[in-house]
Amino acid sequence: MSHLYTGSCLCGDVRFELEGEFKKFFLCHCSRCQKTSGSAHCANLFAPGAKLNWLSGEDKVSFYRHEDTNFARSFCSSCGSNVPVDAKSRGLVVVPAGCLDCDVDITPDAHIFTDSKGNWDEGFADIPAFEAMPS
């Protein structure tokens, strides 16, 4: 069953909708995802055969592919936010979960490339959690 998902970048210049279904949801800890996210991992949804439609700002979408690898990312040239990669040659769209403006109907399937995980990426369940910036 096909769904319609909407999303945008941080500044709102890039907006998109995706028609399709997310089949996989991975939290990737590879060193490239750490660099591009500035965090422990990237949270990417995989939608084989989905149709990506840029609603606005397609001219602001920049694309980067790491030489000699399958690693690629698309991002807003104004604010730097990751946005979907339409991997036509592989027949799928990869969507950074954080750029969606709607709920996601699946939960992560797995942590991947954990051999690259940062040594500080442990024990998060044991640290305090706050609903906003603590004082």
Image (tube, helix red, strand yellow):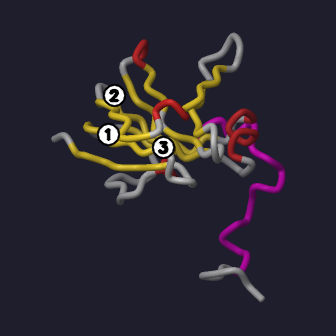
Residue in view at x 40 percent, y 17 percent: 88
Residue in view at x 46 percent, y 33 percent: 58
Rendered location of residue 128, percent (x, y): 71, 80
Residues 123 and 51: in front is: 51
Rendered location of residue 21, percent (x, y): 28, 39
Task: Give the crowd class for mark 3: few <14, some 14-19, many >=20 residues within 10 Å.
Answer: many
Rendered location of residue 12, percent (x, y): 50, 52
Q: Above or below — where is 119 with respect to 93? A: below
Residue in view at x 61 percent, y 40 percent: 28
Left or right of residue 12, residue 119 in this image: right
Of pointers 3 and 2, the one earlier in the residue sequence: 3
Quarter of the image where one finds residue 71: top right
Q: Which residue matches tag 1?
A: 18
Left or right of residue 26, residue 47 in this image: left
- Numbered range of the magenta stretch: 112-128
User: Which mark lies nearer to you, 2 or 1?
Assistant: 1
* Mark 3 secondary-structure assignment: loop
Q: Above or below — where is 1 with respect to 48? A: below
Q: Which residue matches tag 2?
A: 48
Q: Which residue matches tag 3?
A: 14
Residues 47 and 52: in front is: 52
Give me the C-alpha separation between circle 2 and circle 1: 11 Å
Residue in view at x 42 percent, y 45 percent: 15
Left or right of residue 39, residue 45 in this image: left
Of pointers 2 and 1, the one earlier in the residue sequence: 1
Give me the C-alpha separation between circle 3 and circle 2: 22 Å
Indicate whether residue 119 is drawn in magenta: yes
Rendered location of residue 112, percent (x, y): 60, 38
Quarter of the image where one finds residue 18: top left
Task: Give the crowd class for mark 1: few <14, some 14-19, many >=20 residues within 10 Å.
Answer: many
